[in-house]
Amino acid sequence: MSESTLAALEARLRELEDVREINELFQRWHHACTGGFSGKEAGRMEALECLTEDATIELKGMHEPGKGPRGREQYTKFWEYFVGDDGPLPYVFQTAIPTTVVVTGDTAREEHSMLCFAQLRGMKPSIGLSQRINDLVRTPKGWRISKTTIVGGISFNVDELKGPLNALKPLTERTPWKYEG
């Protein structure tokens, strides 16, 4: 086997390993966001382990472009508002359906459609399909999300969620994160 063929195979193998690691990272992200049933709380803080220290979260309809929480302190405060059976978003089930990953050296872009079943307190449950774009960087701990953006989608309400749902704890008073430009 020639050196150029071997180098091409090694590059392809690295790309395949990178794509696999990125897809597994998003599985961990969605798994940590999902809960409200079978004793597992929604929006667990372990999701934040998937982010870089300076990451940004932007959700269309909630944040204007460039005005989502940025950096560990801001996105942790943003996340803490929603976490758990005693928060405003106690029921969530989300997953990615098909993903596209493009790796360019030590950066990557991952895009997927996200299917989400959710229920905010006092609201009807909803089912939504949204588009998500994620920028990633290779770190010493592996691939991490540097920016996660929900760019839009559609949803509709349903009458009720069924399953082994957690009993709601009393709502804990919380202050949502706000952009302070």
Image: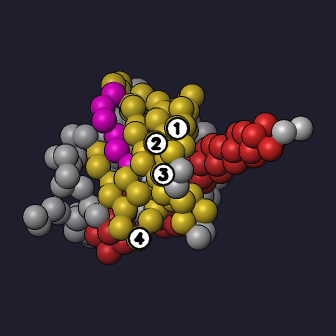
Quarter of the image for residue 70 reads: bottom left
Amino acid type at mark 2: Arg
Q: Position of residue 8 (x, y in %)?
A: 72, 39
In this rendering, the answer to whether 131 lies above or below 32 is: above
Q: Give the Cα distance between marks 4 and 1.
A: 22 Å
In this rendering, the answer to whether 141 lies above or below 104 is: below
Cβ–Cβ under 8 Å for marks 3 and 2: yes
Residue tagged 1:
102
Numbered mark located on residue 109 in the image? 2
What residue is shown at x 36% (from left), y 72% (from top)?
A: 72
Q: Which residues are magenta?
A: 148-153
Residue tagged 3:
107
Mark found first going from the N terminus, 2 or 4:
4
Q: Give the Cα distance between marks 3 and 2.
A: 7 Å
Amino acid type at mark 4: Glu
Mark found first going from the N terminus, 1 or 2:
1
Q: What secondary structure predominates along the stretch shown in magenta?
A: strand
Question: Is 123 colored magenta in this rendering?
Answer: no
Cβ–Cβ under 8 Å for marks 3 and 1: no
Cβ–Cβ under 8 Å for marks 1 and 2: yes
What residue is shown at x 37% (from left), y 53% (from top)?
A: 147
Crowdedness of circle 1 by 10 Å Cα count: few (<14), some, many (20+)? Answer: some
Q: Position of residue 120 (x, y in %)?
A: 35, 46
Residue tagged 4:
53
Q: Position of residue 153 (x, y in %)?
A: 33, 28
**Tally of marks:** 4
